[in-house]
Structure formats: C-alpha cells, structure tokens
Image: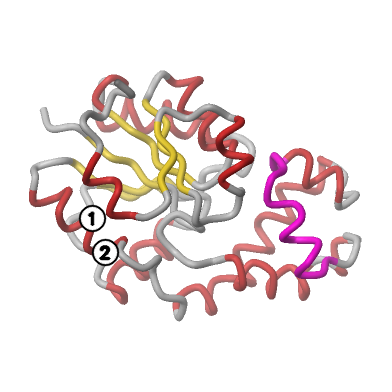
Amino acid sequence: MPACCCFDFDGTLVKSMDVAFSAFERVGPEMGCKPLTRDALLAMRGMHVREVIREMGIPFYRVPRLAKRMRQAMRADLMETPPVDGVIEALEVLVARGHRVGILSSNARDSVLEYAERHGLKGLDFVVGGAALLKKESALRRLLRRERLAAGDVVYVGDEVRDVEAARAVGVAAVAVGWGYNSPEGLARAAPDHLLNHPRELLALTSFNGS
C-alpha cells in the first residue's frame, strides 16, 4: 500500500492566521475573552494551545463553544483565503507518486470539501472534519481504523505542537511545518520527526516513517 500523508487544514494548507485573528476580534468579546492584539498573537506562537487558553483567561469548559463560534465566524473569509504558496504543487506530486493524501480538520467536512473545490486541491483520498480542538489524537485513531491504515504507513502534517503530540500518541510519523500557527522554535521543542520550512520539502522526505 502506498504511504499516506494526512494533513491538518488551518495553517498547514491555508494561510489562516489573519482570518483567525479577525474572527477572534468578533467572537472573543461575546465569550468573555481578553482583548487580543496582533503583537500578542505573534508572542503566543511558541505556546501550546493549552497555554494560549490559560493566557487568554478562557475557562476550559468554554473551549468547545468558542471553537465552534470561531469556525462559524471564519468560514466565509476562509473560503476566500489562498492556500499556502507551494502546497497545491506539492500535493499534486505526492498524488502522482501514488501516495494517499487526505485531510483531518477541526473544520466541518463540507467546508473543507468546498475549499478544496474552489482552490484546486485535487486528488484527496479522504477528508475528515469535525475533529475536536483538544482531541486530535482520538480523531487520528478513528481515521486509521476507518481507512484501514497501518500507523507505520502514515505521516501526519500539522502546524501546531498538539499535532505533533497527536501523531506521537497514535504512533504515526510527525511532520511539523513552520509556516503556520506555532513558531518553528516551539515546534522544534516538540521534537517532530521532520520540521519543514516550505511545502516543497515534503517531496524530499526519504521515508514516511521518521527514519
């Protein structure tokens, strides 16, 4: 079976930082969150999502509702946001090489499919949506079972420390990308199997098992 490359969506495939900031400016006050400046957002790039939640003074019981409202607020702007430079070309080469390529996202599956249609993300073998913000590990396990994938044949590509942690917990290779939310320095501390600076570097990986 060809190796499988599973991608996170926001930040990894889509330039979503500005979209997320704009959505938070609208949603944050109604959820009782502290005001957030762009400088503060950049300062938090090295933090784990749990640290960000504490820093923002958000009670953990409100996180699922906040995540849902953020997804709703981001949807329209996200559809108009271009993919990360070089991502479409990299995905096309991976598919041409016979690898299975798919997406695991906290966004709704229909939203991801619509985005893929609009922006030419072709050849996706699967799209799984609705992964809970702090439960990527569970969603990844379900994906492996549903798609009958062996952990050793899969890499999970994400832009956050929690993506690396989820991959580690499930036993798949962790590929972190430095162009999304978490900073390259923060990702390096999480010790992924690979840390990339540009989508073309996906094509230079010698294997999909961390070796």
Residue type of the residue flagged with mark 2: Ile
**Mark-to-mark CA distance, 1 and 2:** 5 Å
Binning the other alpha carbons within 10 Å of mark 2 as few (below 14), some (14 to 19) or many (20 upward) gives some
User: What quarter of the picture does the N terminus occupy?
Assistant: top left
Tell me the element at label 1.
helix
Residue kind at label 1, given as amino acid type: Leu
Give how far across and how far down residue 146 sits, in percent.
30, 31
Assign a secondary structure to mark 2: helix
Residue 120: give x, y in percent of width and height. Answer: 24, 71
Question: Residue 109 falls in which quadrant of the image?
Answer: bottom left
Q: Confirm whether the magenta stretch covers residue 45.
A: yes
**Does 177 sit above or below residue 115?**
above
- The residue carrying mark 2 is 88
Q: Position of residue 110 (x, y in %)?
A: 40, 62
Residue 210 picture quarter: top left
Q: Is residue 58 above or below residue 81?
A: above
Where does residue 177 sit, x and y in percent of width and height? Answer: 45, 47
Q: Residue at x 72, y 60 (%)?
A: 42
Q: Is disc 1 in contact with disc 2, using a CB cutoff of under 8 Å?
A: yes
Q: What is the magenta range?
A: 36-49
Q: Identify the residue shown where x is 46% and y is 28%.
A: 167
Which quarter of the figure is the C terminus placed in? top left
Task: Give the residue at x 52% y 43%.
Answer: 131
Of the pair 24 and 168, the residue shown nearer to us: 168
Colour treatment of the image: secondary structure
Let me know if residue 31 is in the magenta part: no
Numbered circle sitting on residue 91 = 1
Residue at image position (31%, 76%) is 118
